[in-house]
Image: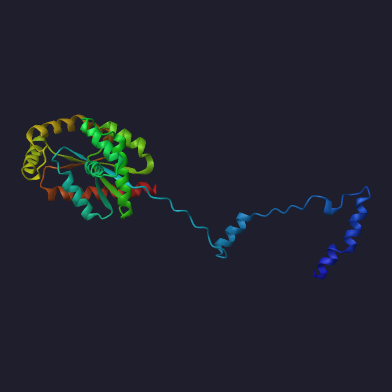
Amino acid sequence: PPKSSYWRTWGLTYWFYNFRQMFSKSKQPLFLGEKAQHEVDVPAIVSSLARARIVPTPPVAKVAEVPKVLFVLGGPGAGKGTQCAKICEAFSHWGHISAGDCLRAERNDPTSKDGELINNIIKEGKIVPSEITVSLLEKAMAKARDEGKTSFLIDGFPRSLGNVNTWESVVGNRAEVLGVLFYEANEEEMEKRLLSRGSTSGRVDDNIESIKKRFKTYIQETMPIVERYAAKSMVFKIDGMPPPEEVWKVTQSKIKTIETQAAKSARE
């Protein structure tokens, strides 16, 4: 039963008094009126208890980190593939994704609907839409992220300003573009390297006529991309003319600089 203090407050005397008031013209009885309002600053109390470690502090939700991307550009034979391999070997969190490899893998996948579409487009002599290439690049990044990769070197894309626009509209803020790693080499040196590679690679496009066409395409379509990112101070130029080991020393230094800048930007 309730304690005696309860009966002293809410006993028969209380009820008799309030029922009597119901039939008088005096003030409305308490139990028929509005409830008393008690203003309590609950957040302030919880905060004080949390500081005193009486209640646990609510955990802060962790924001998912988006992958970081470096577009790797340079003329045919500038040494992009060699340096990308060295970067991935020295920096385990970096992954190398080739647009050409993604397209070839998709074409050879008998279960892929996109693969069938890509084959039909190529048979008709048309260019694979940028949207398909971008979706394949995202797919490859997602798979590599499951393996612990957080940053990506993408080569073979973009090949034109149209590719850049497609990337920005399709991927948007799902990836952070750190800039362009740009390997420079003159046409004569690139021809020499590609012809030497062609003697053992078996690639049909490593011949003098194809090389000249590829270099012309590179000047007309790729250089505007470099200029676009250069205007934003997002181009990291590397001389690709020296021997690979010398180029690697510069490349390694550039990657460290890029990562430092990215970390500083994230803090700000």
**Nearer the observer, 202 or 82:** 202
Q: Which residue of the protein is positioned furthest toward the front in this rendering? A: 110
Residue at 83% over, 51% down: 32
Q: Give whichever of 216, 224 is nearer the camera.
A: 216
Position of 131 relative to 51 (above/below): above
Give percent across and percent down for residue 87.
Answer: 21, 51
Q: Position of residue 77 (x, y in %)?
A: 13, 40
Q: Is residue 245 visible?
A: yes
- Can you say which quadrant of the picture contains the N terminus? bottom right
Nearest to the observer: residue 218 or residue 120: 120
- Residue at image coords 30%, 49%: 151
Across and down, in percent, residue 139 comes to 32, 45
Seen in the picture, residue 20 relative to 203 is either above or below; the reply is below
Callout count? 0
- On the question of residue 231 being in view, the answer is no
According to the image, what is the colour scheme of the structure? rainbow
Q: On the rendered structure, is 223 left or right of 131? A: left
Which of the 4 quarters of the picture holds residue 11? Answer: bottom right
Question: In the drawing, does residue 12 fall left or right of residue 194?
Answer: right
Residue, x 91% and y 59% (percent of image)?
A: 16
Residue 189 image point, x, y percent: 8, 39
